[in-house]
Amino acid sequence: MNLPRDASCDDDYDQTSLSCDEALTRILGQCEPLAGIERLHLRAALGRVLAAPIAAPFDLPAHTNSAVDGYAVRAADLPLEGTRRLRVIGSAFAGHPFAGSLGAGQAVRIMTGAAVPPGTDVVVMQEHALRHGDEVEIDGAHKPGQNVRAAGEDMVRGQCALAAGRRLGPAELGVIASLGIGEVDVHRRVRVAYFSTGDELRSIGETLGPGEIFDSNRYTLFAMLTRAGVEILDLGVVRDRRDLVEARFREAAAIADVVITSGGVSVGEADYIREVLAALGDVRFWKVSMKPGRPLAFGTLGAARFFGLPGNPVSVMVTFYQFVRPALEKMAGGTPSSLLTLKARTTGTLKKRPGRTEFQRGVLSRDVTGELCVTATGDQGSGILQSMTAGDCFIILGLDTAKVEPGTLVDVQPFSALM
């Protein structure tokens, strides 16, 4: 006689679990950009999300200028064949334009970035010219507009240089600085409170007892949240007691926009996360058809959004990057973008049963033909955190995919695009 069984993490198909796409859609549907704007000095705005669009107050570049060191000449003076000597009547430097005007048969020595003298429309690179005292010899292998950067070719006055919702990186700061803007309006940081649950967890520096382990998840979460650019509130470790879990929930909800826990979202007798969340807030879902990471809880806790991540360390990282990170981006005022996914050919067999989307860890390389290939890191257990340090990508195997044979094209997500 077989005993009746509830759905468990060992099952392949579970009708009560959401697909990864549906879970993300539901999460993003419950997340909106936060109110609150700060004005920051440009250097302090690195990594923040722009709250208002920035328009160019003038043409960029503001004047037509030379792209190289050479000689500014008129296209009409270029020889049809052979070479021609032009008289050099002056020089133009960046910040020190040539003050006169050119006549027929004349040229101006010009440096990169210098304003092109009126009437000239060609800059002959100095390596393509011969200097003879106060004359320069050129040939006809040049065209109008050559080596000339037109005023406004980067952007014109009034053009939107950066749209609201753009996260400011090095290039964005450079663009803003080029427009002479020293302060920008950005969305305030998302405040994230997080804690781990479990009687077995000890902090670094404590002595381990029988069956106890060091809490690595809080350090992993700290690193991922820091890279996400949020304000971090580490609430430590909470023991497996309902009253302690509830007290920490109330504390977190009062100070944070997002609350994240790791562990305690399964169906064990000491797993109180879902029970307390149901009492204090709202559980939207708690299972996703994925591996690792099926016991993922999402809901609301007062005004805060709640993510109950699994306890196993690899599951924490997978669920964070697939679900939490896009939600934080949207709440920060940005636009969650589809994660970079590439195609790579497997070098070996990948074990897989249909029923869940799997995020196996792999290493990317190129074969002798230059094609992208991927090799699994080895044991794919959700507790083997070294599979993350050994790998450089997720190998994404779809819901209905079974065992994957060598040479099969699969989707991969490079860690460089996530972390």
Image: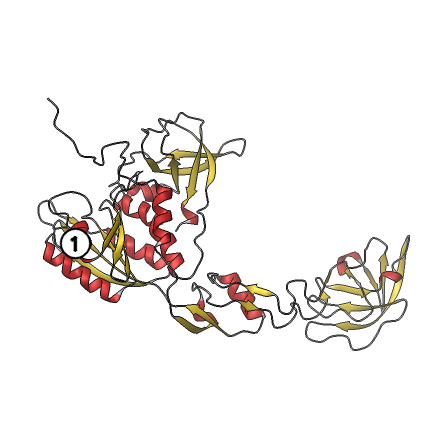
Residue 97 at least partly seen: yes
Which of the 4 quarters of the picture holds residue 295? top left
* Figure coloring: secondary structure
Q: Measuring from the top left, give residue 336's x and y in whole percent.
A: 43, 53
- Residue closest to the eye, 404 or 55: 55
- Side of 345 relative to 63 (left or right): left
262 to 334, vertically: above or below:
above
Residue 322 at least partly seen: no
Q: Residue furthest bottom?
A: 99
- Residue underneath mark 1: 276
Circle 1 packing at 10 Å, graded few (<14), some (14-19), many (20+), is some
Q: Measuring from the top left, give residue 105's x and y in whole percent.
A: 90, 66
Amino acid type, callout 1? Val
8 to 132, vertically: above or below:
above
- Side of 91 relative to 343 (left or right): right
Which of the 4 quarters of the picture holds residue 412? top left
Q: Measuring from the top left, give residue 103's x and y in whole percent.
A: 89, 71
Q: Secondary structure at mark 1?
A: helix
> Residue at point 28% right, 52% down?
220
Q: Measuring from the top left, give residue 93's x and y in whole percent.
A: 71, 72
Which of the 4 quarters of the picture holds residue 179? bottom right
> Residue at point 39% right, 62% down?
33
